[in-house]
Image (cartoon, rainbow, N blue to C red):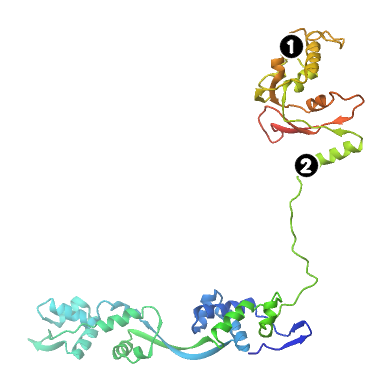
């Protein structure tokens, strides 16, 4: 078939065959799909390429022995502009219709007034030839008289058939009615040479070529055992080609920034401390000596959570906080001078700053303590591009 030369060296199979191009495979695929002979024009249209491109690709396939090209002369027919005027009624039929509608006879002058002189001259000749009318002289006038009529169904059928230029069959070409229409110039005929493309190999073989036409890309056990490598080209391996780039997921830049701060703080000897998002007001405000009636503890500034915290186990801390708030305790301060409420301190909120985390972590630790917290805190405010309700605080 023109592309079967192979060499085999040990376990290395070497192909000296050129693979089919994408264009060749495209054209071959159309022939396989249609599974019939196609003209070059039809092949180009089905492959969505130009006729000149199809001709080049077909020639390449012919050189490989995959297809063959047959040149043949075809005859095309098309109804002429005059013929299109007679698809419903030919002139002689129109003449018969006029005569039948006027009692079967009319003088020539009247007929010419109804149909037109040019059309009457055509109609008279063919109607007389068919024996449909007779012309007699009467009082120095030419009288046309109706004799009989046979509908010209075959004439009209052929005129309609060739409204678009169509290849005519041998049977139609020998049809006497068709010959008459050609002589009357109601149908125009021309001949041209056409290239017919057909598969020169079995259909199954063509399917196999399409599958491996661009080359065998993977030399598998199946390819070696079935000896497909003897019939199809092997794609050359490009050992210098880089593998496809994989764009894996990456850390968010802000997350990386936070991790960098953590690393720096640990290098300086600080220990990171963590706590829950939801905490009692005791840790967020009271332990930091913020009065329970302070405006920043208003519902407009913090996010309140349903429920109350159980502060049992922290009795000593609660007592010391109460004393400092009410009269200063042992701090030397006068305190705030009001009655401190544990109910207020037990209310749950979303922490509003990370000082609450470090303050709680200091309980029970002997100084010096090197602690830090970098975590999410929550503020009751409208989210904007530069300020969210949830932020990181250091």
Whether residue 21 can be seen here: yes
Q: Indicate whether 17 appears above or below 332.
A: below
Between residue 108 and residue 362, name the one nearer to us: 362
Q: Is residue 264 left or right of residue 234?
A: right
Q: Position of residue 8 (x, y in %)?
A: 76, 86
Disc nearer the start of the sequence (1/2):
2
Kindly give the residue lying farthest to the front in the view shown: 313
Local packing at callout 2 (Cα closer than 10 Å; few below 14, some 14-19, many 20+) is: few
* Quadrant of the snapshot with the C terminus: top right
Q: Position of residue 187 (x, y in %)?
A: 34, 84
Q: Position of residue 282 (x, y in %)?
A: 75, 20
Q: How many marks?
A: 2
Q: Indicate whether 257 appears above or below 235.
A: above
Whether residue 232 can be seen here: no
Residue 215 occupies quadrant? bottom right
Q: Is residue 294 left or right of residue 163?
A: right
Residue shown at 76% from the left, 49% from the top: 250
Q: Is residue 91 left or right of residue 26?
A: left
- Residue indicated by mark 2: 255
Residue shown at 72% from the left, 18% from the top: 345
Residue 225 occupies quadrant? bottom right
Are the two marked residues, 1 and 2, in contact with CB atoms closer than 8 angstroms?
Answer: no
Q: Indicate whether 363 appears above or below 158.
A: above
Residue shown at 28% from the left, 80% from the top: 156
Label 1, label 2: how many angstroms apart (C-alpha)?
Answer: 41 Å
Q: Indicate whether 252 appears above or below 308.
A: below
């Amino acid at each position: 078939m023109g592309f079967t030369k192979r060499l085999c060296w040990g376990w290395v199979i070497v192909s000296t065959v050129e693979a089919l191009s994408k264009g060749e495979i495209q054209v071959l695929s159309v022939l396989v799909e249609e599974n019939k002979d196609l003209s070059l024009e039809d092949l180009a249209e089905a492959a969505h390429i130009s006729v000149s491109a199809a001709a080049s690709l077909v020639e390449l396939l012919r050189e490989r022995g995959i297809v063959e090209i047959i040149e043949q002369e075809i005859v095309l027919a098309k109804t002429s502009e005059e013929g299109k005027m007679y698809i419903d009624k030919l002139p002689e039929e129109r003449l018969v219709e006029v005569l039948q509608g006027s009692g079967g006879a009319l003088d020539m002058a009247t007929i010419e007034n109804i149909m037109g002189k040019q059309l009457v001259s055509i109609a008279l000749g063919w109607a007389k030839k068919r024996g449909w009318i007779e012309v007699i002289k009467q009082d120095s006038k030419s009288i046309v008289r109706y004799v009989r009529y046979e509908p010209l169904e075959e004439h009209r059928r052929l005129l309609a058939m060739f409204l678009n230029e169509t290849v005519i069959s041998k049977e139609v070409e020998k049809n006497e009615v068709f010959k008459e229409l050609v002589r009357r110039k109601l149908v125009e005929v021309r001949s041209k040479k056409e290239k017919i493309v057909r598969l020169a190999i079995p259909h199954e073989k063509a399917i196999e070529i399409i599958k491996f036409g661009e080359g065998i890309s993977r030399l598998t056990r199946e390819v070696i055992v079935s000896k497909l490598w003897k019939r199809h080209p092997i794609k050359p391996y490009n050992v210098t080609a880089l593998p496809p780039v994989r764009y894996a997921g990456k850390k968010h830049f802000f997350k990386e920034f936070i991790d960098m701060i953590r690393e720096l703080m640990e290098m300086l000897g600080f220990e990171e401390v963590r706590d829950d998002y939801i905490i009692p007001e005791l840790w967020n405000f009271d332990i930091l000596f913020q009065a329970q009636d302070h405006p920043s503890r208003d519902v407009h500034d913090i996010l309140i959570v349903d429920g109350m915290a159980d502060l049992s186990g922290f009795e000593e801390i609660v007592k010391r906080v109460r004393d400092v708030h009410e009269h200063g305790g042992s701090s030397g301060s006068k305190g705030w001078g009001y009655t401190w409420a544990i109910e207020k301190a037990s209310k749950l909120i979303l922490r509003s700053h990370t000082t609450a985390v470090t303050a709680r972590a200091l309980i029970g630790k002997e100084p010096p303590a090197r602690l830090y917290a970098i975590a999410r805190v929550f503020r009751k405010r409208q989210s904007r591009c530069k300020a969210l309700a949830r932020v990181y605080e250091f």
